Image: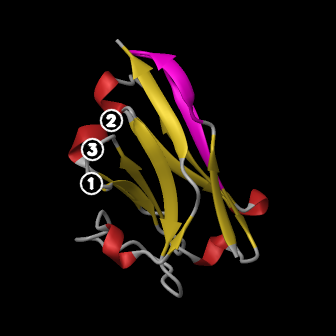
Amino acid sequence: VQLQASGGGLVQSGGSLRLSCAASGFPLDYYAIGWFRQAPGKEREGVSCISSSDGRTFYVDSVKGRFTVTRDNAKNTVYLQMNSLRPEDTAVYYCATERGVPDCRSGTYYRPIHYDWWGQGTLVTVSS
């Protein structure tokens, strides 16, 4: 069972990146997938979540209107499209899931403690 985040890189402020979260060893379409990030010296924070049963999506306020999470079950992959990037978006981004849980916890999806399968992160650097 593995999750692998990829797609990070260096981008200028205002630019865009699309991150991918590829799953192997389990069918991703039965699980909610959360995106998190951790900036240097800061705690890991939730960014977004997408449910599996109805595709419902959740975003923290700091990324609403700029980030979009989607899933392609045929490719066993979830994407995070990040537009209008800002220097404060600089962080290592992770995807994660909670075993046996198909949908995002509507009130607490952003809390890392709920998630028990984590992928390796991908670094996003936004220059000013």
Q: Determine crowd level at label 1: few under 14, some 14-19, many 20+ residues with C-alpha closer than 10 A.
A: few
Residue 3 part of the magenta segment: no
Quadrant assignment for the C terminus:
top left
Instruction: Quote the CA–CA distance across marks 2 and 1.
Output: 23 Å
Observer-side mark, 3 or 2, equals 3
Vertical placement of 10 versus 37: above or below?
above
Observer-side mark, 2 or 1, equals 1
Q: Disc 2 marks which residue?
A: 65
**Disc 2, SS:** loop
Residue 126 lies in quadrant? top left
Image spot of residue 39 (x, y percent): 34, 41
Image spot of residue 98 (x, y percent): 48, 78
Q: Residue at coordinates 38% horizontally, 32% vertically from top-left?
A: 90
**Disc 1, SS:** loop
Q: Are marks 3 and 2 in contact (CB under 8 Å)?
A: no
Instruction: Quote the CA–CA distance across marks 1 and 3.
Output: 7 Å
Q: Disc 3 marks which residue?
A: 41
Image spot of residue 88 (x, y percent): 29, 29
Q: What residue type is labelled 2?
A: Gly
Q: Residue at coordinates 39% horizontally, 25% vertically from top-left?
A: 85
Q: How is the image coloured?
A: secondary structure
Q: Do the residues labelled 1 and 3 touch (CB within 8 Å)?
A: no
Magenta stretch in the rendered image? 8-21
Give the number of marks: 3
**Disc 3, SS:** loop
Q: Residue 114 — which label? A: none
Identify the main secondary structure in magenta: strand
Q: Do the residues labelled 2 and 1 touch (CB within 8 Å)?
A: no
Q: Which amino acid does label 3 sit on?
A: Gly
Residue 117 lies in quadrant? bottom right
Q: Residue 43 — which label? A: 1
